């Protein structure tokens, strides 16, 4: 069944209901992420963070072991797996019913993660960095987040150029979705890739266009949390960008976003509740 028919998406053995938008809470296992790298040095710290995100209202935990901040260098697959698998096993055991997403662009890492119970693979490159990813995910019941990125994390912000960013991102989605449709795979989530090979202007054009992408019949994820599209406008730093993040998340929700990927779950959940109340009050 397609998402557009019942507003839900299958994530492995779990069903994710998106009739109301949900929050994906970020757990970075990297020492060098742009906002919260190097936070988890012990199992207790990791579990405490996960528990906080879930108590605050996260529906999905998104675990990443490779920094994808602008300028980040690629990590070897072995290093990524070494960082990832232990924490994934720990979280899967502790929270068997929680939907866990793995932020990776490598097919072999995705396979190892799915073998350990991952429910979603979140690929920042949409299968471009690893050509084996799309074919592999077509054989899996885990959901796939198809994100657009121009270039690689190391090069993406050097000089991103588009003739029409909204149209080009849409063309990328449709091209990739064609491969999944042919394989009969429908549990796909679209992510325009805010901050991944885009200028501030590009990002806000994409923000306005979210509803256009929802017309493709798949849920859309917005990942704007504490990013430069906020900091450059407000002349602030990631550590001080919570208010700006909430404002942009609210715009994303009003434009049709189904999932908010955030560092700050409580504030995102509150934004969803207020936007849902706004919609309900104005639908009568």
Image (cartoon, grey):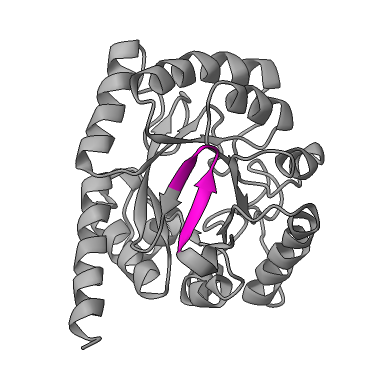
Q: Residue at x 22, y 78 (%)?
A: 280
Please identify the quadrant where the N terminus is shown: bottom right
Observer-nearest of 276 and 199: 276
Q: Residue at x 47, y 77 (%)?
A: 208
Q: Which residues are magenta?
A: 7-15
**Residue 52 position in % (x across, y down):** 23, 32
Camera sees residue 61: yes
Secondary structure that dominates the magenta span:
strand
Picture quadrant where residue 270 is located: bottom left
Camera sees residue 203: no
Q: Residue at x 64, y 72 (%)?
A: 165
The residue at the far front in this view is 1
**Residue 268 position in % (x across, y down):** 27, 54
State left or right for residue 243 relative to residue 165.
left
Please identify the quadrant where the C terminus is shown: bottom left
Q: Residue at x 53, y 26 (%)?
A: 117
């Amino acid at each position: 069944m397609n998402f557009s028919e019942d507003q839900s998406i299958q994530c492995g053995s779990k069903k994710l209901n998106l009739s109301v938008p949900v929050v994906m809470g970020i757990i970075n296992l990297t020492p060098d992420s742009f906002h919260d790298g190097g936070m988890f040095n012990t199992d207790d710290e990791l579990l405490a963070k996960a528990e906080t995100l879930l108590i605050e209202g996260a529906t999905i935990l998104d675990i990443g072991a490779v920094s994808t901040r602008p300028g980040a260098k690629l990590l070897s697959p072995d290093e990524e797996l070494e960082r990832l698998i232990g924490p994934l096993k720990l979280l899967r055991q502790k929270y068997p019913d929680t939907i866990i997403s793995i932020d990776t662009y490598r097919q072999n890492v995705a396979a190892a993660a799915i073998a350990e119970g991952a429910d979603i693979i979140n690929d920042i490159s949409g299968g471009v960095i690893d050509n084996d990813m799309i074919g592999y995910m077509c054989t899996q019941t885990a959901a796939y987040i198809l994100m657009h990125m121009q270039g690689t994390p190391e090069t993406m912000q050097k000089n991103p150029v588009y003739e029409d960013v909204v149209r080009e991102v849409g063309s990328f989605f449709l091209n990739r979705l064609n491969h999944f449709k042919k394989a009969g795979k429908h549990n796909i989530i679209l992510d325009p890739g805010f901050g991944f090979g885009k200028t501030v202007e590009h990002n806000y054009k994409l923000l306005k266009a979210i509803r256009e992408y929802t017309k493709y019949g798949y849920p859309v994820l917005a990942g704007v949390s504490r990013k430069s599209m906020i900091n450059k406008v407000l002349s602030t730093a990631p550590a001080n960008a919570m208010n700006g993040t909430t404002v942009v998340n609210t715009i994303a929700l009003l434009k049709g976003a189904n999932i908010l990927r955030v560092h700050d779950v409580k504030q995102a959940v509150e934004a969803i509740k207020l936007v849902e109340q706004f919609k309900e009050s104005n639908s009568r």
